[in-house]
């Protein structure tokens, strides 16, 4: 067989590379193997005709790169039923946005609609397994008690997905608040033909088992996802300074940062028990996004990153974690 036909002759592989790149958007989009590209903050384009581009309004610290997801084989893409999608056959990127006028009731309704549409989309398509989901919403900790918007988001999400996802099906996830109103709930995902293995963190209570004090509906996500393919990185959920179910070090950003690193280390250890080839610490195959609640703390976190994770590519964003006392959260991929 002619070598040129190799990519089409074989079934698509579930390989994914995540990279932070400073090239212009049009140059990144010219790559036929680009599955998705994300621009952050005011300096990034707000929209693009290509459905593989998604703007995330969270302000970036400094000169933020684009986040690129690259796959093997040719990527097809389009927009259907209000969902932007792309696929190489094995993996699918998808994104949708729902208007959110800002009240507690509004975010519950928006989340229910977003997740009902996501549920139907996954059920009807070729990539039924969500490996990783990101949720960006406004005013995440506005509202008191069970009316807090994050809690209403959790209620709407669970209602929309239509069934309690069993622990073996929960995706890894992130839920972060915009510091300034965007007027919408933004949900995007990486889905696959083949399910992965959700991982939990022995240092933390499973989020789906959080006690009632955190709201009427425990959040449905796993701490990380180990995809079936060894050509894919470990997908790490938003990770904060939560031990057991309790927030730690409400008085110290630096202590929270150290607790996050301990949680990440524990997750990596879990992954290595199943897949010993996963590197034992963050390194040049890791890509992190760091969400910091207080804009004034961004330089401090930047310094902590350089000191504690030298050489690890990281994108620093101004975003609100879903509990008021949590100052910093980290998600990313690790290979
Ligand atoms: C925590 O550990 C922090 O609701 O999808 C992290 C990742 C958090 C995902 C979600 C929430 C979510 O509880 C918050």
Image (spheres, helix red, strand yellow):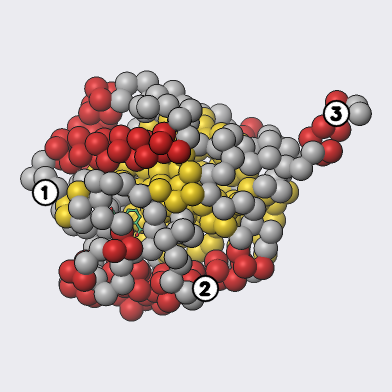
Identify the image quadrant of residue 101.
bottom left
Residue 33 in percent (x, y) is at 68, 37
Residue 148: x %, y % from top left: 24, 70
Question: From the viewer's perspective, is residue 158 above or below residue 60?
Answer: below
> Residue 185, located in which quarter of the rendered image?
bottom left
Using the rendered image of the protein, determine whether residue 208 is visible from the camera's viewpoint: yes
- The N terminus lies in quadrant: top right
Q: Residue furthest front?
A: 273
Does label 2 or label 1 sit earlier along the sequence?
Answer: 2
Q: Label 2 belongs to which residue?
A: 116
Circle 1/circle 3 CB separation < 8 Å: no
Mark 2 and mark 1: span between their CA atoms? Answer: 35 Å
Q: Helix, strand or loop at disc 2?
A: helix
Q: Position of residue 259 (x, y in %)?
A: 20, 39
> Which x, y percent locates residue 170?
45, 59
Marks 2 and 1 close (CB-CB < 8 Å): no
Q: Which residue in the structure is indicated by mark 3?
A: 4
Tag on residue 250?
1
The label number, if any, that marks residue 223 in the structure image:
none
Determine crowd level at label 1: few under 14, some 14-19, many 20+ residues with C-alpha closer than 10 A.
few
- Circles 2 and 3: CB atoms closer than 8 Å: no
Rounded to the nearest angstrom, the CA distance separating label 2 from label 3 is 41 Å
Q: Write the residue at 79% across / 38% down.
A: 10
Question: In the figure, 61 relative to 215: above or below?
Answer: above
Looking at this view, is 277 or 243 the one in front?
A: 277
Mark 3: secondary structure = helix
Q: Kindly report the distance in space between the C-alpha atoms of the residues bearing marks 1 and 3.
A: 57 Å
> In this view of the protein, which residue sits in the foreground, 254 or 213?
213
Tell me the quarter of the picture where residue 291 sits: top left
Q: Earlier in the sequence, mark 2 or mark 3?
A: 3
> Looking at the image, which residue sits at the far left?
251
């Amino acid at each position: 067989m002619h070598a040129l036909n190799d990519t089409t002759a074989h079934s698509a592989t579930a390989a994914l590379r995540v990279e932070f790149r400073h090239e212009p958007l049009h140059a990144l989009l010219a790559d036929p193997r680009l599955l998705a590209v994300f621009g952050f903050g005011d300096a990034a384009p707000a929209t693009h005709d290509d459905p593989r581009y998604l703007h995330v309004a969270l302000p970036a610290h400094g000169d933020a790169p684009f986040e690129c997801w690259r796959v093997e084989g040719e990527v097809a893409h389009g927009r259907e039923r209000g969902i932007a999608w792309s696929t190489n056959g094995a993996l699918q990127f998808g994104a949708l946005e729902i208007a959110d006028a800002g009240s507690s009731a509004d975010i519950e309704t928006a989340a229910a609609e977003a997740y009902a549409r996501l549920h139907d989309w996954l059920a009807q398509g070729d990539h039924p397994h969500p490996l990783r989901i990101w949720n960006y919403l406004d005013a995440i900790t506005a509202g008191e008690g069970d009316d807090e918007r994050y809690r209403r988001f959790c209620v709407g999400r669970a209602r929309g997905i239509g069934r309690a996802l069993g622990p073996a099906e929960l995706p890894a996830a992130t839920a972060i608040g915009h510091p300034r109103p965007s007027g919408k709930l933004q949900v995007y995902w990486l889905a696959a033909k083949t399910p992965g293995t959700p991982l939990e963190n022995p240092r933390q209570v499973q989020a789906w088992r959080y006690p009632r004090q955190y709201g009427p509906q425990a959040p449905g996500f796993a701490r990380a996802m180990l995809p079936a393919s060894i050509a894919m990185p470990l997908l790490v959920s938003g990770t904060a300074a939560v031990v057991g179910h309790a927030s730690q070090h409400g008085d110290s950003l630096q202590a929270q940062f150290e607790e996050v690193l301990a949680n990440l280390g524990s997750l990596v250890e879990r992954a290595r028990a199943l897949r010993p080839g996963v590197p034992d610490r963050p390194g040049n195959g890791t890509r992190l996004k760091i969400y910091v609640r207080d804009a004034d703390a961004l330089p401090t976190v930047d310094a902590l990153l350089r000191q504690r994770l030298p050489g690890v590519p990281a994108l620093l964003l101004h975003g609100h974690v879903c509990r008021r006392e949590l100052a910093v959260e980290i998600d990313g991929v690790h290979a």
